[in-house]
Image (spheres, grey):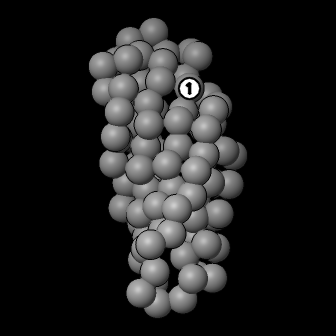
């Protein structure tokens, strides 16, 4: 069993309030849950308007599947994000 963790730092330069950021985050979380077999949570910077850290986790018996899912998620976020990915890290357990 392989567990994959994708940690992302996101920057939302357009956000002028926590509501702006949370609206953007809700769309990202919904998209990940709907299109990918993964769980997502906001890990840090909950009270900062323009920044957040997300943790995204998926699990499978095959390492290649886990790697592929995390790569698809990263590409999906980058293509739909109204902001930028400032940091991305993958870990496997």
Q: Which residue is mark 1?
A: 11
Residue 23 in the figure: left or right of residue 90: left
Please give the name of the residue rendered at 34% of the width and 41% of the height, measured from the top-left corner.
42
Residue beneath the point at 54% across and 76% down: 66
Q: Residue at x 57, y 82 (%)?
A: 63
Relative placement, left or right, of 19 versus 37 is: left
Q: Judge from the rendering whether residue 34 lies leftward or rightward of residue 87; answer left or right.
A: left
User: Which quarter of the figure is the C terminus placed in?
Assistant: bottom left
Q: Position of residue 33 (x, y in %)?
A: 40, 61
The furthest residue to the bottom: 61
From what the image shows, is residue 19 above or below residue 64? above
Give the image location of residue 81, x and y in percent: 60, 38
Name the spot of residue 56 as percent of width and height, x first.
43, 56
Q: Is residue 93 above or below residue 78?
A: below
Q: From the viewer's perspective, is 42 left or right of 50? A: left
Q: Residue furthest left?
A: 47
Q: Position of residue 68 (x, y in %)?
A: 64, 73
**Residue, x 41% and y 63% (percent of image)?**
57
């Amino acid at each position: 069993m392989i567990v994959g963790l994708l940690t992302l730092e996101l920057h939302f330069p357009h956000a002028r309030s926590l509501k702006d950021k949370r609206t953007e985050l809700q769309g990202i979380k919904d998209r990940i849950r709907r299109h990918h077999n993964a769980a997502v949570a906001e890990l840090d910077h909950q009270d900062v308007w323009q920044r957040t850290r997300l943790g995204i986790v998926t699990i499978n018996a095959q390492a290649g599947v886990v790697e592929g899912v995390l790569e698809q998620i990263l590409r999906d976020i980058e293509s739909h994000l109204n902001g930028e990915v400032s940091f991305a890290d993958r870990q496997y357990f």
